[in-house]
Amino acid sequence: MDYFSIVKRAWEITKRYRFLWGLGVLAMFSEGGANFNGSNIGNWNTSLPPSGPTEQGDEGLPDTTLSFFRSTFIPKVSGADGNISGAEAQVDRVAGWLINNWQLAITIGVGILAVFLVILYVSYVARAGLVVAIDELEGRKNELTFGSAYHAGRQYFWRLFGFDILISLVAIGLLMIMIAPVILLFIAAGKSPAVLALAILLAIIVFLIFIVVIIYFGILRLLGSRALVINNLGIRASISYGHQMIINKKGYSVLAWLVSLLVGLVYGIALGIAVIIVGLILFAVGYGIYKAAGSVGQVPITVTMIGIFIALLMFVSGVFTSFISTYWTLTFRAIDYYFKKDKEISVNP
């Protein structure tokens, strides 16, 4: 296999068919995660009501409720004067707000869950649509559009989601099975240096095995998910197909993963440098506008600069997601060709 040609072809496709970028922006949410921090996290003192009696006649929270929150979430840390840290007062305010506004808290929680599920659905559909689009282009020379590729990916949502869930559960189960003897050995070691040394040795061996297992499941997820979409297989059949591809073509699979790792490393370094440069430019522009507009424009300028930064980051990440997905779809097609060829030879020697 010519991996350089596959990388080159993947980049040519990504550069030419720009609708893949939009699919990549949507698909990256099922490939990774994003952290969103609320703007009022550090302002609980001013945004939350006190837990004691209020002017409306609220009698405050029961001591048992506050004691539960304190003992569960906040450690007892005493200051130099022996008094308990002010963290308990913070918990009182949080507990007070949650209990006194439980209906609003539930509504917000349900809303966040609904948004998360919608994003999850859209992302998985776009992820399948990327695979379909590349397979159609390479296999049938059929150029899809954003809409047709996304529509084609809808039928694979439940199977692709179930595939990821099953892979994750198996990986977690294996991790727990491998870690359990190590933990038990550390507990049994006590003050015995010999047993402790054996536990450390076993921990190192388990760690090395776990790295291999994680790599295996990573490759299985990449190849098996494409077998599911391209060959229209079920969840278990696609896992079995991906496993057989890895076992029979382990050299091709591992080298493909290493090339992908190298590409990701180069991308990560380039993205880090770009983030620093763009961040400094946006900061300089924002600071200049702030000096000209005064404190009145501080909030809108900050929000605008942050919005531009996030939009640029999502755009670049989306393009890379479409590129790396294209690379793995082309890689799957290449490995699958040799895999099927070997099966034909074994059946008809």
Image: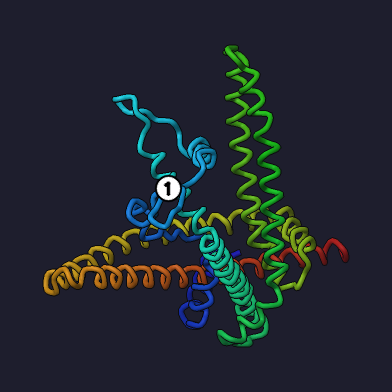
Residue 254 against residue 337 in the figure, above or below: above
Residue 191 against residue 319 in the figure, above or below: above
Residue furthest to the left in view is 292
Q: In this orientation, does residue 143 appear?
A: yes
The spot of residue 284 in percent (x, y) is: 18, 66
Q: Is residue 244 left or right of residue 180?
A: right
The spot of residue 245 in percent (x, y) is: 72, 59
Residue 306 against residue 254 in the figure, above or below: below
Q: Is residue 283 left or right of residue 100?
A: left
The spot of residue 346 in percent (x, y) is: 84, 61
Q: Quadrant of residue 206?
A: top right
Q: Quadrant of residue 257?
A: bottom right
Location of the N terminus (image quadrant): bottom right
Q: Nearer the viewer, residue 224 or 23?
A: 23
Residue furthest to the right in view is 348
Q: Nearer the viewer, residue 311 or 87?
A: 87
Residue at 76% x, 57% y is 244
**Pointer 1 residue:** 51
Q: Nearer the viewer, residue 156 or 296?
A: 296
- Total tally of numbered discs in the picture: 1
The spot of residue 80 in percent (x, y) is: 29, 25
Residue at 68% x, 32% y is 180
Residue at 58% x, 65% y is 110
Q: Nearer the viewer, residue 129 or 69?
A: 69
Residue 164 against residue 303 in the figure, above or below: above
Crowding at mark 1 (Cα within 10 Å: few <14, some 14-19, many 20+): many
Residue type at mark 1 is: Ser
Q: In this orientation, does residue 330 appear?
A: no
Q: Is residue 284 left or right of residue 320?
A: left
Location of the C terminus (image quadrant): bottom right
